[in-house]
Image: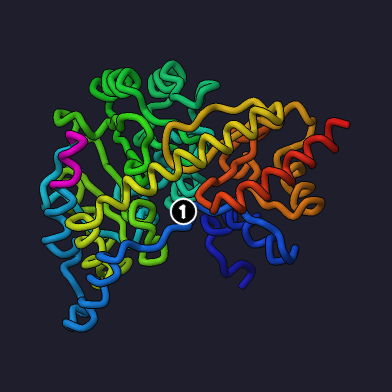
Amino acid sequence: MDNIFSKKVEGIEISGIRKFFNKVAEYPGAISLTLGEPDFKIPKEVKEAMKNAIDEDKTTYTPNAGILELRTAISQYLLKDSIRYSENEICITVGGSEALLCAFNALINEGDKVLIPTVAYPAYESCAKLVGAEILTYKLKEDFSIDMDSIREIIKKEHPKLLVVSFPSNPTGAVMTKLQRDELYSIVRDEDILIISDEIYSAISFENHYSISQYDDIKDKVILVSGFSKMFSMTGIRIGYICASESILKEVVKVHQYNVSCAPSIGQYGALAGLKEALYHCEIIKNEFKIRRDYVYGRLKAMGLEVELPKGAFYILPSIRKFNLTSEEFCNKLLQNKKVAIVPGSAFGIGGEGYIRISYCYSTENLKKALDSLEEFIKELTN
């Protein structure tokens, strides 16, 4: 055979986030601020529920869409943000990542146009490429909010089938304001377009959380993706969920069924206990992340970097354009010279060039060490 690989797979690359995380092993003693891996432990209630699930032999297949109790608990949890989905409009997935890929597979035909923000989490573009979509990008403003004029113009001209939004945002930390939500609604309501709203960081929002999913009259256009990796510090347990109208979810569940059959039963019972007994954990980590955010933001400003104050998630995206280095050159030099790993903005699309992403979900001690080294590096560059 001349070529045994799928062109769609060959057309994507390993995430730039993982690329720099993997490089850390080459530099013993290096500090990594690359991954979105909270340094908190899983709440004891979640741990006990998973242990009990094993002891009680709850280790068999669950329904494809997940256990009813968890879907009901998610439905009730979302109501606090005025988001209304019944248990029959929710499917439990193997993390938010599987939810995204299931949605793309269920909705997109070869050649369909998908509209993705730049900057954005790299999985959106990779998922779109895997299903053969044509990728379009829309701009963000300087404060990383949506440029609504950019969206309007592209929709009118290109007629994309699907629009992706993500708030709170990885990598920018931006959230959707009420004004932005209402403006986006006025666009979507009158256009023939679907929306995937990735809200995996919704529990870590330092301001009010607004979502396009809060509008009931466009439910047949909106697919909500979220999960428990960040809110209960259970990244390796891999439990996410997808919400959509029953007509859409029915097709999504087909993909999910043939992909994984069902999400891990033990993790589902853990997530259920989290929603019922451990929501206090979300407040603890949110308060701690806010302290870390303020510390990192203050340090970066003191270094003379242009940077927006994040309103959610646990990432910050300062500009390094004034140093006349590409973001990858900057991050490579920082790792080689100071043994600090961060992620180049180019990993998040064309709009990310000229920025670096710092994850502040690490200990204050490591943040201080890393920022001290970054400050030294910047002084050397300046001099």
Q: Toward which corner of the image does residue 166 lie, by quadrant? A: top left
In the image, 110 versus 376, the foreground residue is: 376
| Up-down relation of residue 364 to residue 143 (above or below) | below
For the point 43% across and 41% down, which residue is it? 313
| Up-down relation of residue 239 to residue 152 (above or below) | below
Q: Is residue 23 left or right of residue 207?
A: right
For the point 25% across and 68% down, which residue is it? 262
Q: Is residue 5 left or right of residue 154?
A: right
Q: Which residue is mark 1?
A: 130
For the point 22% across and 47% down, which residue is it? 243
Whole-percent x, y for residue 9 in the image: 53, 58
- State the count of labels: 1
Task: Tell me if I can see residue 16 in this picture.
Answer: no
Whole-percent x, y for residue 103 in the image: 32, 50
In the image, 107 versus 219, the foreground residue is: 219
Check the picture and name the quadrant holding the C terminus.
Answer: top right
